[in-house]
């Protein structure tokens, strides 16, 4: 029930780390997912393209056909659902007409994802970008709307909510997730507390699956980290505190009988596969120590 993986798989810099051979962009686009899923530690991957636009059942089915039965996909909901505003290619902002619209979410995300992936569907993550002062000044406005949305979603899939505003991490926010049976997605982002602090805050919720996206090194902006870490084939800035927090919570969750989904981005430490390797090593150390004490 431990599903570790990365955000996407199309990185030529992972040759020798994930891919057995010299994989170029074109080959990664065609064969990368199947090759990625053969790596013994990669048991999930995040489908990030769905954040920018919905995809259909056939696309999901094509992904599912390339991976083994024990593989699970983490799917990001379209930004049109999770953001109150949208930005055009020219930089102009407009209101999203389907912000937290449950009918749109079912039609464009839940139904095609469930039908196309079947049992290979992992968490459906509603990643909310920074929402602006209209919501951060009064988090209850967002929480009330989020509650109505989550309560109306069909039962079955594992849902998780990720936010990018620390002001939203109130007791009422976690209660909203708890009563609707939705998990909190721990995310490492500039506006958010460290993963360990987020995990501490979320402990008010009932035990359940653990979902985390270790996305960005503390103190960095996305583009800065991308430029510094490219081509993502070595650890540049290790973050042992975040890793330890995520590993400890993964051990606790699995010990309680629930699955774990941890997705790592190259911008967390420099190379997602190497971060996962260190994560797995530490996981084994802690689990072995617990077994010895038992």
Image (tube, rainbow, N blue to C red):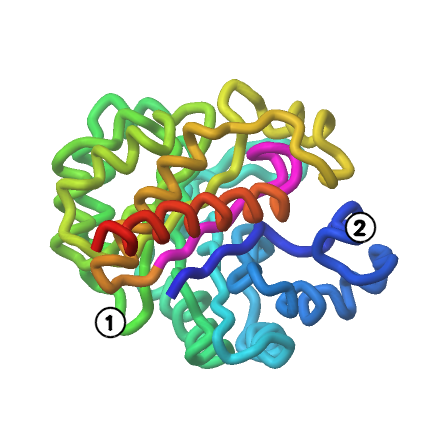
Look at 37% across and 48% down and name the residue there: 99
Secondary structure found at label 1: loop
- Mark drawn on residue 12: 2
Q: Residue at x 57, y 48 (%)?
A: 277
| Picture layout, residue 11 above or below residue 129 | below
Indicate whether residue 266 is drawn in magenta: yes
SS of the residue at dot 2? Answer: helix
Q: Residue at x 15, y 51 (%)?
A: 178
Label count reads 2
Q: Which residue is mark 1?
A: 155
Q: Is residue 245 magenta?
A: no
Residue ID at (32%, 59%): 159
Q: State which region is magenta.
A: 260-271
Depth check: give the residue in front, 247 or 68. Answer: 247
Query: 71 or 143, which is in the foreground?
Result: 71
Query: Residue extending furthest front?
Result: 292
């Amino acid at each position: 029930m431990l599903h570790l993986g990365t955000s996407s798989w199309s990185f030529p810099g992972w040759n020798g780390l994930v891919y057995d051979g010299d994989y170029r962009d074109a080959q990664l686009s065609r064969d990368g997912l199947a090759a990625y899923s053969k790596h013994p530690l990669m048991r999930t991957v995040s489908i990030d393209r769905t954040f920018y636009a919905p995809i259909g059942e056939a696309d999901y089915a094509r992904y599912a056909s390339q991976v083994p039965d024990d593989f699970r996909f983490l799917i990001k909901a379209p930004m049109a659902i999770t953001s109150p505003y949208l930005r055009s290619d020219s930089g102009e902002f407009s209101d999203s007409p389907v912000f937290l619209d449950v009918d749109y979410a079912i039609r464009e995300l839940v139904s095609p994802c469930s039908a196309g992936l079947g049992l290979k569907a992992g968490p459906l993550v509603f990643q909310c970008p920074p929402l602006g002062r209209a919501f951060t000044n009064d988090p209850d406005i967002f929480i009330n709307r989020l509650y109505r949305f989550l309560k109306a979603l069909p039962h079955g899939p594992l849902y998780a909510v990720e936010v990018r505003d620390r002001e939203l991490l109130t007791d009422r926010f976690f209660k909203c997730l708890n009563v609707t049976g939705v998990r909190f997605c721990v995310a490492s982002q500039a506006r958010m507390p460290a993963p360990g602090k987020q995990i501490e805050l979320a402990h008010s919720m009932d035990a359940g699956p653990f979902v985390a996206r270790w996305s960005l090194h503390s103190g960095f902006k996305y583009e800065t980290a991308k430029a510094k870490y490219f081509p993502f084939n070595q650890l540049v800035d290790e973050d042992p505190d975040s890793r330890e927090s995520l590993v400890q919570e993964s051990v606790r969750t699995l010990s309680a009988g629930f699955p774990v989904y941890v997705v790592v981005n190259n911008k967390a430490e420099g190379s997602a596969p190497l971060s996962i390797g260190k994560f797995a090593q530490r996981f084994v150390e802690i689990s072995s120590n617990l077994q010895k004490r038992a």
